[in-house]
Amino acid sequence: SSRTARSEEDRDSLWDAWGSWSECSRTCGGGASYSLRRCLSSKTCEGRNIRYRTCSNVDCPPEAGDFRAQQCSAHNDVKYQGQFYEWLPISNDPDNPCSLKCQARGAALVVELAPKVLDGTRCYTESLDMCISGLCQIVGCDRQLGSTVKEDNCGVCNGDGSTCRLVRGQYKSQLSANKLDDTVVAVPYGSRQVRLVLKGPDHLYLETKTLQGVKSENSLSSTGSFLLENSSIDFQKFPDKEILRISGPLNADFTIKIRYAGAADSSVQFIFYQPIIHRWRETDFFPCSASCGGGYQLTSAECFDLRSNRVVADQYCHYYPENIKPKPKLQECNLDPCPASDGYKQIMPYDLYHPLPRWESTPWTACSSSCGGGIQSRSVSCVEEDIQGHISPVEEWKCMYTPKMPVVQPCNIFDCPKWLAQEWSPCTVTCGQGLRYRVVLCIDHRGMHTGGCSPKTKPHIKEECIVPTPCYKPKEKLPMEAKLPWYKQAQELEEGAVVSEEPSFIPEAWSTCSVTCGVGSQVRLVKCQVLLSFSQSVADLPIDECEGPKPVSQRACYSGPCSGEAAEHTPEETELLYGSLQEFDELYDWEYEGFTECSESCGGGVQEAVVTCLNKQTRETADETLCVTSRRPPQLLKACSLDPCPPR
């Protein structure tokens, strides 16, 4: 073979020049190539006559398989002790990682089929170190022999860890009768060093989605290592816990879920490094603001998706606190005088005569939801003001020297009203089967009684109960807790009907019970009324002018047992006497009592309706705490003092 020219160092050291490099031991996945030299002296030359370098440092296609496994399978057609075997690789041998040890499939037979693996074989599955001439050689992430350069946690060779972020958290299962599973955490494409530990009776399983939208699932039914979307998964299953490891990088979006399997709660601890796939990228200078006579031009920064190689909305880059948007650069340009001008014109963007363009916004729109979280939006545009003060819209790049104001923001993020059920009352009997009641209120996010809860989801206020005491004793009175006060609390609180500009049924207060003891009846008047917005007065209408079901005008009432009457009843009698008591109204309720004085004496003012707590039977004013279970009516305002004020 041809020899390269000798260097002065070679001539001084009695060695011939190094020969050319040999063919690479592998075509992909990282192999080794060697070069030889000859000692020209009859004496022993110092140093080695062979040197190595890495080569073919490109990833192999997934179908190529493991290099060590290929070497084991090459012995499948060679008899061992008179018998053919299918050989599988033994990896990560701590004593001799560069020998070819293989195990027969389906048997405990382990044999060293060769003292040395082929050059370029990895010493260990999770390392770049490679075997060369039977010895394990250190290889850095730069794929150079003898290099100690390592990848950072983000997978960047000799990186500083700034291209990913550590995600650490804990999940606790929330058992529910109508939920069979739940999502623990979503781990995005490109994440590394994923580790989850589940403690408890439940089970982990995986869902994946590739960048092309292909979905798959793995139930993680048994311990072992396997490939899922070309990502190596290591799963260990124990009686009381499960451990999931994925070294990564993930080649798909993984969603780790939990499937409920027992009555006890489970907890999952997880940790992984998530890539920052959206990064700021500085743009070139935009065109000059003037073609001559002096102008200015700016750079900007755009949010770039490293996964799809395209520009995306800025909000994606704002998601990562590590991302700091570069400040725009401003420079003067086209400073040559214009042909029609008499000389040099200097542009001073920050002076009063030539102010910089600026962002302007419209008012926020109404929130898309009254509770539970909504959004509201506005328009933001770049405008420029000339010397005369005229404002006109211009291209957005002219305002990029300052951050653009947000065009969307969350609103009404407080929880929606929900039903709150109080404790059950004691059973209405002291033996056998009876009924029990509870108060159910609609509570807002401040803990106040309000309206707006869905009637379809309201918990029931009455249910049957059984007292495990046999009914063989003489009849005795009901326990004190089962008397009238419990029934008055257990009634469903009706939403206070308020007169509106749409015709609606407005019931008046119930009359007193027709009897002083036992079961009687109550009546009330129900009118069809409408609020006249101009005069702020209420008008009565014919009943057929109101739509919807008309509230009942008669109901049963119970005033306690009559003297000498036994207070214990059969379940049928209890239902007859007490079942209708859920329709009782509260004794106290809110009502409007006139208006306050006008806020202005002329030129237009407002008056506010006064709301007081009244006793429905006596029509007397009561302490407001007695009306706390009733819905306070909405605030009413009306215009007043509309005459113009006299000139001063």
Image (cartoon, helix red, strand yellow):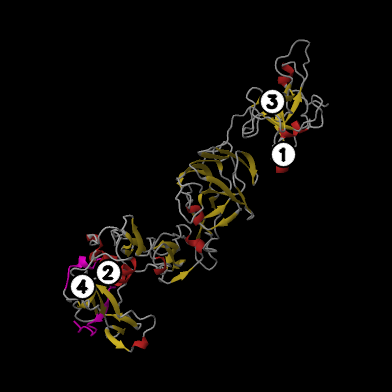
The local secondary structure at tag 4 comes to loop
- Identify the image quadrant of the C terminus: bottom left
Amino acid type, callout 4 = Cys
**Comes first in the chain, label 3 or label 2:** 3
Q: In the rendered image, which residue does mark 2 sit on?
A: 630
Q: CA distance from mark 1 to mark 3?
A: 18 Å
Q: Position of residue 178 (x, y in %)?
A: 48, 56
Q: CA distance from mark 3 to mark 2?
A: 82 Å
Q: In the rendered image, which residue does mark 4 sit on?
A: 517
Q: Which residues are magenta?
A: 621-648
| Residue 153 in view here | yes
Amino acid type, callout 2 = Ser
**Comes first in the chain, label 3 or label 4:** 3
| Front: mark 4 or 1 | 4
For the residue carrying disc 2, how many other residues have a C-alpha within 10 Å: few (<14), some (14-19), or many (20+)? Answer: many
Q: CA distance from mark 2 to mark 1?
A: 73 Å
The disc placed on residue 242 is: none
Residue 466 appears left or right of 80: left
| Residue 163 in view here | no
Instruction: Verify CB contact (< 8 Å) between mark 3 and mark 2.
Output: no
For residue 640: magenta?
yes
Residue at the farthest top position? 43
